Amino acid sequence: MRLLVFLTCLIWGTCSLAGDSLAGDSFASDNLLNNSGDMRQRLAACSSCHEYAGDSQQSYAPSIAGKPLEYLNQQLLNYREGRRLNSVMNTLLAYLGDDYLYEIAGYYSTLPVTDVPRNSSAVKQSSAEAIRGKTLVHSGITGPACSACHGNDLRGDGVAIPSLRGLSAKYIAAQLGAWRTNTRRARAPDCMKEVANMLTNDELSAVAQWIAHSFEEAATPQPNNVETPLPCGAHK
């Protein structure tokens, strides 16, 4: 039933949006969008999980506000083309064109970034788990550190590598698991698949929990590395 509502909203724009406000009008003013009503129709389905402001209230759905345009656009293409598997997203995007998806990505990329997970299902880490998580994130053990690509402040590169701030532990763990099971793939070479397969289950959990709940420790921007430690298709 929920999927039917999503499809109806997306294709026919029949959901009532009276009183809803849209941020990010700067994207429309850049002549990439000229009809806010059209964008409201497009976002009717998106907002059910990601909100109009891109600030998700659900632990299973990421906040996407302020994510890089190239990254968001590539994820929409990955869903449409079956590299990333999710029954709702795959169905919603199956018949949408490149320009249409690019404009949706552009809208969300202009919105204010969310740093704090809204519904993160907080789990108190022990001191040992927190140390392990922080070490994996900033130094790595068997594989590269998360910060080697996502930056020392974990806010990404602003182009094709996303911020990890504002994501719930549940979502982070699910995505690492998806790379392991091949239900999430990226353009080759898929560096994240390599990294995810280097982690043990305990390490994966420690990373997810530390990123979600220790954001204050990574809040100060620092210079990000220019080159990724593994060959990566993100910048193709």
Image (tube, rainbow, N blue to C red):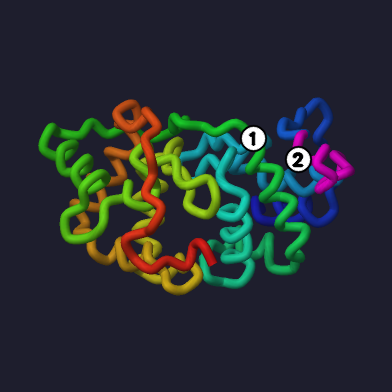
Relative depth, front residue between 203 and 106? 106
Task: Mark yes or no: residue 88 visible.
Answer: no
Residue of label 1: 111
Rendering coords of residue 18 (x, y %): 83, 30
> Image point 56% across, 44% down: which residue?
67
Q: SS of the residue at dot 1?
A: loop
Q: Would you say 186 lies left or right of 150 here?
A: right
List the single residue furthest toward the left.
128
Residue located at (76% from left, 35% from top): 26
Q: Residues within 10 Å of mark 2 (few under 14, many from 20)?
A: some
Q: In the rendering, at what x and y percent does residue 42 appear?
A: 77, 49
Q: Main secondary structure of the magenta part?
A: helix
**Would you identify the image quadrant in which residue 170 lies?**
top left
* Quadrant in which the C terminus is drawn: bottom right
Asked if marks 1 and 2 touch (Cβ < 8 Å), the reply is no
Badge 2 amino acid: Phe
Quadrant hosting residue 43:
top right
Q: Classify residue 197 by image quadrant.
A: bottom left
Would residue 167 be seen by someone viewing this image from the given angle? Answer: yes
Q: Would you say residue 33 sits in the magenta stretch?
A: yes
